[in-house]
Image (cartoon, helix red, strand yellow):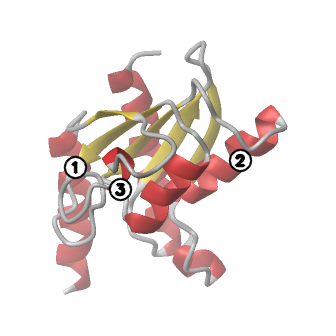
Amino acid sequence: MDHVAAMRLALDEARAALATGDVPVGAVVLDPEGTVISRGRNTRERDADPTGHAEVVAIREAARARGEWRLEGCTLVVTLEPCTMCAGAVVAARVGTLVFGAWDDKAGAVGSLWDVVRDRRLNHRPQVVSEVLAEESGALLREFFAAQR
């Protein structure tokens, strides 16, 4: 599966988060062969869980599906640039490639505010592909926050 097709699946997850009042962020994890092994969406509101970010949900599910915590060779595709917590989870899980859509100028940790995943002091650095369907990902977020005001 290519990055655009995977991002469309992540966008479907982001839209599903809207039903629970969560910020519309979605994610999928692909195994090394490109097969979707997990999906995630923000669940902070639904679960009253501050760690309920789409990336963490998807990483946890992928680890269960593989039966191990190392996601070497896997690709995490997420609609929004990961925050520091999620960027740390990407590094800790040894995700091979991180693909994201929109930049997050307020909390992004893959180049916007910080660059956790490329920090040479860490033991793992995933390949990063940014701005895949960025406009579509950003529009979904802008619409959500406009409605909140």
Res. 41 visible in picture: no
Give how far across and how far down residue 42 sits, in percent.
50, 64
Which one is earlier in the sequence, the residue at label 2 or at label 1?
2
Q: Which of marks 1 and 3 is in front?
A: 3
Kindly identify the amino acid type of the residue bearing the numbered disc 3.
Answer: Val
Q: Mark 2 points at which residue?
A: 61
The residue nearer to you, when weighing 9 against 118, is 118
Q: Quadrant of the C terminus?
A: bottom left
> In the drawing, does residue 55 fall left or right of residue 126?
right
| Pointer 3 residue | 116
Residue of label 1: 102
Q: Within 10 Å of the Cα at label 3, are there few (<14), some (14-19), or many (20+) other Cα atoms?
A: many
Marks 2 and 3, Cα distance to the nearest angstrom? 22 Å
Query: x, y percentage for residue 61?
Result: 71, 47
Residue projecting furthest to the front? 121
Mark 3 secondary-structure assignment = helix
- The type of residue carrying mark 1 is Ala
In the image, is residue 50 above or below residue 65? below
State how far apart marks 2 and 1 are (Cα): 23 Å
The amino acid at mark 2 is Glu
Between 117 and 77, the residue placed more toward the observer is 117
| Residue at image coords 27%, 43% | 101
Residue 116 lies left or right of residue 103; in this view the side is: right
First-in-chain label (1 vs 3): 1
